[in-house]
Every structure is written in C-alpha cells, then in structure tokens.
Amino acid sequence: MKLKTKLSEEDFELIKAAKETADRLHVDDVHEVAAALRTKSKKIFTGIHIDASVGYADVCGEIAAICCAVSQGFREFETIVAVWGDGKGTYKLLSPCGRCREVISDFSKDTWVIVGSIDHPYKVKVSELLPLKFNHSREH
C-alpha cells in the first residue's frame, strides 16, 4: 500500500458534509452510514444507507451518494467518505465495503477514499483498496 495521503481543507469539508447528513437523517436503532462525494467539478453530493428487510437489498451510503451525483449528470468523482453516526455526536470513518469499492472503481480507479479514524483521517486511491480489480474488457 502506498503512503497515507494527508487531507486538504476540502476533504475535511467533505467529512463535515457526511456528518451533517448522518445527523440530519439519523433514525434510532438503524445502522446509519452517511456518505459524501465530491466530483471533479467540486460539487458535493451526500447519501444515507437504506436498510432493507433482506440484506442484499440494502443500499450503502456511498452508493446512495453516487446515485444522487449520477442522477444530476455527474460521473467524474474526486473523493468519497463514509461516516457512521449515532445521532448524538459520535462518529466513525468507515472504509467502503467490497461492493462499494467495486462501484466507486467502476467510475474511476483514481477516486480518493477517506479512511482511518475521525481523529486521524487519511486518503487512498480506491485502486489501493481494490487491487487486481476484475475487468469486463475482453482485452487482457
């Protein structure tokens, strides 16, 4: 894995947007994960995890944020972050699940992902989180 990359002021603003979304949309007794995504044109989109009675139908916060961006015509992503919140001011940074890593990488293997802890965040490229990604191309 490459060296941890320090966050910019924009990255801390992205974490703040995810926290605000987690607080605004919090529902007690539900696994709440909010995400914030910054496009290459610097527009921020947020999303919240949607719980379903069957696990495979859940929608992760990162996917919800991506869907918001794509529905507005944005497909070039710069950075994404996922935050768990308890609705009372406690937060944790979360690394994307495998499914989210795949989707983020499908848009760009160069998208930055903010990981680590709230007190010590850093960012890595999604390609570092998903080495040897499956490629649909017939070219090898």
Image (cartoon, rainbow, N blue to C red):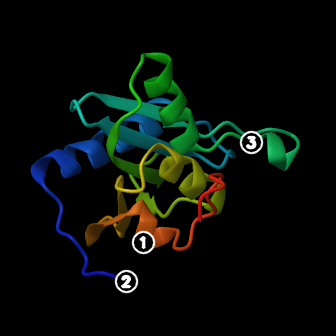
Task: Point out residue 77 in the picture as x, y percentages from the top left corner.
Answer: 35, 40
Residue at 13%, 55% in the rendered image: 8
Judge depth for marks 3 and 2 and give the one in front: 2
Vertical position of residue 140 compared to residue 44: above or below: below
Q: SS of the residue at dot 2?
A: loop
37 vs 61, left or right, is left
Q: Tag 1 or tag 3, which sits nearer the N-term?
A: 3
Q: Tag 2 or tag 1, which sits nearer the N-term?
A: 2
Dot 2, crowdedness within 10 Å: few (<14), some or many (≥20)?
Answer: few
Spatial separation of the CA atoms under disc 1 and disc 2: 6 Å
Judge depth for marks 3 and 1 and give the one in front: 1
Check contact, mark 1 vs mark 2: CB within 8 A: yes
Spatial separation of the CA atoms under disc 3 and disc 1: 25 Å
User: Quarter of the image holding residue 124?
Assistant: bottom left
Q: Which residue of the protein is positioned furthest toward the left in this rendering? A: 9
Residue at 35%, 63% in the rendered image: 125
Q: Amino acid at mark 3?
A: Asp
97 vs 12, left or right, is right
Q: Tag 2 or tag 3, which sits nearer the N-term?
A: 2
Residue at 38%, 40% in the rendered image: 36
Dot 3, crowdedness within 10 Å: few (<14), some or many (≥20)?
Answer: few
Residue at 60%, 58% in the rendered image: 139
Vertical position of residue 73 compared to residue 91: above or below: above
Quarter of the image for the C terminus: give it: bottom right
Residue matched to label 3: 58
Q: Which residue of the protein is positioned furthest toward the top in this rendering? A: 72
Task: Point out residue 81 in the picture as x, y percentages from the top left corner.
Answer: 39, 51
Vertical position of residue 114 compared to residue 119: above or below: above
Residue matched to label 2: 1
Residue matched to label 1: 128
Spatial separation of the CA atoms under disc 3 and disc 2: 30 Å
